[in-house]
Image (cartoon, helix red, strand yellow):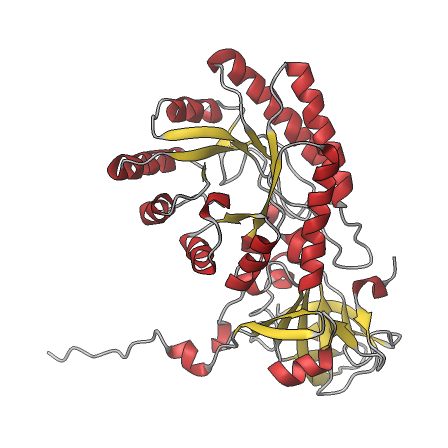
């Protein structure tokens, strides 16, 4: 698969996103700019739905919105009849403002506050995923105080270590998330929840990591969870209505990546669940998944304006752009790799290898090391591909740089869905210090 499977060009030979010329997008909305091809998002989501529909099982596809959260993306997911996974009061509040159905919301997080749990309970979210014993106590208090009942799941760590970066592994025993299965924490949590009249335990949840390219880890996850559920059935007569396998489905960032295809994942995982159900004489649970990166990752593009060019003899040159680690921390945080091209001619053959540097005051602010690019000039629009996940959602105001605008493009039309921050925005929460003269 060649690089041009990543993008489309128009008659002028320019990069297009959602049918809109990328040069026009940069001119209209300025740079740095994050642009989403909305049709790509819809297609990715539908591919999971179609794969499950062919398997004839009960399922739910819950968009893991920490990948990219906004009112606009929540609207799109709602249009697709999807569910939503939120991990904070802020994401939950955004879903409320977007008008997203609360019955389709799953509330995650390893340290939810009492006020966040109260917000979730008051708005009747679909399910709260319990992550630790402290949270069980907090939620019990909230439910008692509000005379409310709610659906819950237990997040467990099944002891599966995904083959991915250690920062995004989550299913192994040494994890900050969930109740450990091996040492008995998960069973103790089960006992506490079953004893609480205000909590209805609908199932279990596990998430083994992110950017996973093979199904082997997910199959092992299923086996471990179903073995646990067999024991719970024998000991407590509890059978889960829902088996939530989390997300973590890898996408293609560069030519070296082989993305995990939805149809492959779904077919193999459903078969594994069915085999375990038959082996352990359990009822077939609904299968829930939580794709995030695989829904929005390849749909996103980051557009930058090229600036300074630094060349030292016998070393690779540096091309600096007007964004960087403030709008995409992933390369600096865990050495994430991307591909770049020039928006004016994405099909041009590379003529040099450069370090594509950000504008932030950090030596580690390198967006792409050893990027292959055609000859470029100051003012060129540089596009980095597949930046739709964990770019804007992890953005910061480091160096007091405003965060970029976000644009949705579809059917030849572009709309700003998150405004570019201004300098006034940067200081809007600052307060002058009044020295106490005594």
Q: Which quadrant of the view contains residue 132?
A: top left
* Rendered view: 261 above or below 239: below
Q: Quadrant of residue 76?
A: bottom right
Name the one closer to the observer, 162 or 5.
5
**Looking at the image, how many numbered discs can be counted on the residues?**
0
Q: Position of residue 215 (x, y in %)?
A: 74, 37
| Apparent side of residue 177 relative to residue 221 in the rendered image (left or right) | left
Is 93 on the left-hand or right-hand side of 254? Answer: left
Can the viewer see residue 305? no
Quarter of the rendering containing residue 230: top right
Left or right position of 413 against 238: right
The residue at 60%/74% (across/down) is 415
Farthest residue to the top: give it: 234
Nearest the eye: 353 or 279: 279
Q: Nearer the viewer, residue 280 or 353?
A: 280
Relative to 242, say whether 89 is above or below: below
Q: Position of residue 1 (x, y in %)?
A: 88, 57
| Residue 316, position as x, y percentages in the image | 78, 75
Residue at position x 44%, y 53% in the image: 92
Q: What residue occupies the far left of the structure in this picture?
A: 438
Instruction: Give the vertical position of 99 relative to 316 (above or below).
Output: above
Say which residue appears at 41% left-offset and 45% top-offset. 111
Q: Nearer the viewer, residue 281 or 53?
A: 53
From this viewpoint, is residue 180 visible?
yes
Q: Residue at x 31, y 36 (%)?
A: 148
Residue 270 spot, x, y in % from top left: 70, 31
Q: Quadrant of the C terminus?
A: bottom left
């Amino acid at each position: 698969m060649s690089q041009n499977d990543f993008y489309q060009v128009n008659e002028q030979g320019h990069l297009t996103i959602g049918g809109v010329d990328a040069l026009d997008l940069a001119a209209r909305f300025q740079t740095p700019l994050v642009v989403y091809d909305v049709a790509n998002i819809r297609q990715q989501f539908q591919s999971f739905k179609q794969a499950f529909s062919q398997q004839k099982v009960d399922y739910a596809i819950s968009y893991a919105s920490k990948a990219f959260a906004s009112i606009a993306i929540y609207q799109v997911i709602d249009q697709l009849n999807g569910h939503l996974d939120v991990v904070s009061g802020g994401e939950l509040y955004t879903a409320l403002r977007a008008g997203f159905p609360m019955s389709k919301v799953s509330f995650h997080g390893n340290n939810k506050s009492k006020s966040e749990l109260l917000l979730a309970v008051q708005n009747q979210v679909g399910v709260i995923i319990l992550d630790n014993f402290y949270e069980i106590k907090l939620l019990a208090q909230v439910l008692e105080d509000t005379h409310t009942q709610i659906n819950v799941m237990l997040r467990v760590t099944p002891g599966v270590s995904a083959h991915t970066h250690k920062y995004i592994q989550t299913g192994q025993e040494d994890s900050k998330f969930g109740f450990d299965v091996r040492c008995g924490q998960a069973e103790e949590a089960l006992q506490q929840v079953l004893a609480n009249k205000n909590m209805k335990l609908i199932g279990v949840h596990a998430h083994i990591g992110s950017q996973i390219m093979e199904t082997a880890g997910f199959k092992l996850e299923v086996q471990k969870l179903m073995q646990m559920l067999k024991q719970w059935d024998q000991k407590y007569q509890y059978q889960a209505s829902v088996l939530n396998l989390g997300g973590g489905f890898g996408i293609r960032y560069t030519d070296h990546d082989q993305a995990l295809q939805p149809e492959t994942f779904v077919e193999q995982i459903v078969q594994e669940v069915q085999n375990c159900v038959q082996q352990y004489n359990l009822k077939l649970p609904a299968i829930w998944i939580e794709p995030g990166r695989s829904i929005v990752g390849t749909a996103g593009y980051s557009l930058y304006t090229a600036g300074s060019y630094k060349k030292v003899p016998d070393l690779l040159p540096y091309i600096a752009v007007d964004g960087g680690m403030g709008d995409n921390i992933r390369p600096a945080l865990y050495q994430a790799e991307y591909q770049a091209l020039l928006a004016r001619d994405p099909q041009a053959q590379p003529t040099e290898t450069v370090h594509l540097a950000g504008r932030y005051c950090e030596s580690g602010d390198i967006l792409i090391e050893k990027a292959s690019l055609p000859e470029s000039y100051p003012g060129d629009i540089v596009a980095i591909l597949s930046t739709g996940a964990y770019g804007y959602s992890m953005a910061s105001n480091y160096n007091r740089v405003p965060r970029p605008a976000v644009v949705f493009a579809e059917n030849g039309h572009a709309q700003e869905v998150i405004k570019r921050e201004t300098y006034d925005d940067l200081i809007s929460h600052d307060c002058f210090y009044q020295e106490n003269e005594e």
